[in-house]
Image: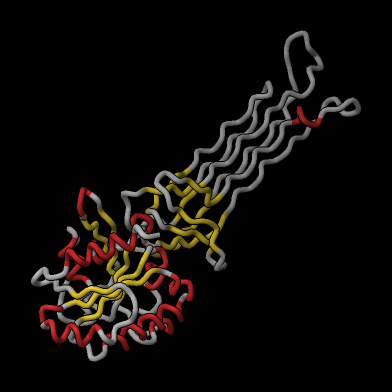
Amino acid sequence: MASSNFVDYVKIYCRSGNGGAGSAHLRREKFIPKGGPDGGDGGRGGHIILKGNNQMWTLLHLRYRRHIFAENGAPGGVQQSTGADGQDIIVEVPLGTIARMENSPEILFEITEHGDEKILAKGGRGGLGNTHFKSATNQTPRYAQPGEPGIEEAFILELKILADVGLVGFPNAGKSTPLSVVSAARPKIADYPFTTLVPNLGIVSYRDDKSFVMADIPGIIEGAHEGKGLGIRFLRHIERNSMLLFLIPADSRNITEEYEILLRELGEYNPELLDKKRLLGISKSDMLDEELKDEIRKDLPAIPRVFFSSVTGEGISNLKDMIWKELNSY
């Protein structure tokens, strides 16, 4: 993913179509002097619909399309003919997109499946023609119902990426390197903190043509839930992952302490994240001999863990095996 192309938050202004007005026409034909009402109903205004597309991974296309207006419904015609419905506007979005109104934290809906369609802004109903208002005491109503106005509102679309495994760790912990080794993803890799500024997705090939999706999240620092570092901007991407892989380099001062800090930050942001399955990967293990590994194992938390090195390839197969086993143990 190119860093400039990943957009996970957009504000769009939508206006659905107004319903067409009903017709107040009276029937006029030769030899029929008093034909009575024959006005048709107005057409429905166009909806604005969000549709899931599993080939998309960013909301970039909506950054430059801030205003979306649907077509109004046509008015009713003579001989009880109904006006045409306004054309619906279908906006394709990546899976994991949630929609809410600008001034409300309440989520309207979320798109999680390919082809899933949800109405963001509903078009107004068409008005009733004067045919509906005739009665024994009012045989020639000269009025009809106007169409309902459409919805005019600003909406917020947020993308929470869908992945099987989310990589969690401090900045410069070496999260992007294993992703580049086990998948075809090519995230930016450099020796300084916050090299990764946007999430990166990679499809990891496993045995017998199986695969799973891994997400590299920008680094978390102590106090991230309060807005430090990149803050909570990208923490929402972890919410959709099936499990979390905590990556801590072997040369860390205290692996268990760093793990607990990361865990605490996730819990402060959203306590439900603590219910997800957790794995521990200790990277840069090529710097350790077996004696050092045995010493480190004594103090590690009681969760599945593996030592691996992205440089030498040591432990990469064990890492994949551990992830696949946990993914299929639900």
Residue lying at the far right in this picture: please name it.
Answer: 137
Q: How many marks?
A: 0
Residue 191: image quadrant is bottom left
Q: Is residue 61 above or below residue 41?
A: below
Q: What percent of the width, then of the height, locates residue 285? A: 15, 78
Residue 121 lies, with reference to residue 288, above or below; the image says above
Q: Residue furthest left?
A: 312
Relative to the observer, which residue lies in front, 223 or 245?
Answer: 245
Q: Quadrant of the N terminus?
A: bottom left
Q: Is residue 105 left or right of residue 190?
A: right
Instruction: State left or right for residue 190 relative to residue 84.
Output: left
x then y, percent, for residue 136: 89, 25
The quadrant of the picture occupied by the C terminus is bottom left
Residue 82 visible, this angle: yes
Q: Is residue 85 above or below residue 80?
A: below
Which residue: 42% across, 44% down?
115
In the image shown, does 306 or 1 lie closer to the viewer? 306
Residue 17 sits above or below residue 313 on the image: above
Question: In this rendering, would 312 be left or right of 232?
Answer: left
Q: Position of residue 37 (x, y in %)?
A: 77, 24
Locate residue 298, reporting x and y percent: 26, 86
The residue closer to the viewer here, 322 or 245, is: 322
Q: Is residue 218 visible?
A: no
